[in-house]
Amino acid sequence: MNQKIGRRALVAGALAMPFAARAETTWPTKPIHIIVPFNPGGAIDALVRVIAEGLTPRLGQQVLVDPKPGANTIVGSEIVARAAPDGYTFLITTNSTHTNNPSLHAKLPFDPAKELIPVSLISLGTILLAVKADAPFDDLRGMGVWVKGLGRPATYGSWGIGSSGHLYGLMLESALGGKYNHVPYRGDVPALQDVANGTLDITWASPTSAKPQITAGRIKPLAVAGAKRSASMPQLKTFGEQLVAGFDLNLFVAAYAPAGTPADIIDRLQRAIKAVIDEPAVADKLVAQGQTPVGSTPKELADVLARETPVWAELIRQSGAKVE
């Protein structure tokens, strides 16, 4: 009897093994959510929707984009850090989540380095500095002279305390002179609207968000940050080309998963993202949005984080920026 039971158990185990293997490779079996810690309609939201549209047919399930803005990406990123590591919740965010926030905040509600694991680089991005269309200057040096003669601090907008726009704004004083006051917004679109309306002097923004206002003749861009000109605005000079140094740090967009997400799921999502980015039509859309398409392995993204985080941390230290 025991031998028969033993044989049945072996047969049952052998039969179950293929089903167990299939269970590991059936992902996904329901819609996937990508959390975007920025406002709907903004530059990162638009970029992620392009990626999600390409992922849906490749993964065989609807890939949904959920904007969860707030606190310089902390609100949305914490949602993903706390999510079940089952392959149905991911994060696409800017470098601020990993390279800026840990140095800016004495205490975060989660540890990005430990609770969000790399999936893939998406793209390298650029941001520009914009002013009202009828501002009495057309370049950075002219803006510096104008700010010094204002008789008050110039107001500048960004998409949150500790964001790259905020930090770059802190650098304007030492680079150009004059006084500047930071005004944080929940995204760059409302800041651009206030510049166009004349209630904000200057703002940082993505080329994607700025283009409608530029086309409408309501704002004008002065310079683009980064080592190279934006592919979507090749006519716009960099800070370096206008002899203003220090504004060439990398800004990047990348995908992450909750810690503990199975490696085979990470691998499949990474390969799907890379395949989408490699499509010429998708690459063209990213370039039009001011992004340079990349796509990478998880290790390559981890290496970028290891290299870039100390650079941003030192910039934050020098600036004295802190968020209580």
Image (spheres, helix red, strand yellow):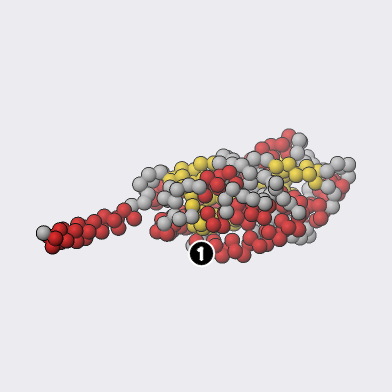
Residue 261 percent across, percent down from the top left: 44, 54
- Quarter of the picture containing the N terminus is bottom left
Can I make out residue 224 in this image? no
Element type at mark 1: helix
Image position of 127 (left or right of 131): left
Which residue appears farthest toward the front when viewing the image?
A: 2
Q: Residue at x 56, y 44 (%)?
A: 76
Image position of 286 (left or right of 156): left
Q: On screen, 234 above or below 146? A: below
Residue 199 percent across, percent down from the top left: 76, 35
Q: How many marks?
A: 1
Q: Residue at x 40, y 43 (%)?
A: 31
Q: Residue at x 53, y 54 (%)?
A: 115
Give the quarter of the image for residue 171. bottom right
Residue 311 percent across, percent down from the top left: 68, 62
At label 1, the amino acid type is Lys
Give the quarter of the image for residue 190. top right
Residue 90 percent across, percent down from the top left: 48, 49
Q: Between residue 83 and residue 122, name the one nearer to us.
A: 83
Which residue appears farthest toward the left when viewing the image?
A: 1
Give neighbour class at mark 1: few <14, some 14-19, many 20+ (Cα, 10 Å).
Answer: few
Image position of 32 (left or right of 245): left
Can I make out residue 130 in this image? yes
Q: Residue at x 67, y 51 (%)?
A: 106
Q: What residue is disc 1 on?
A: 299
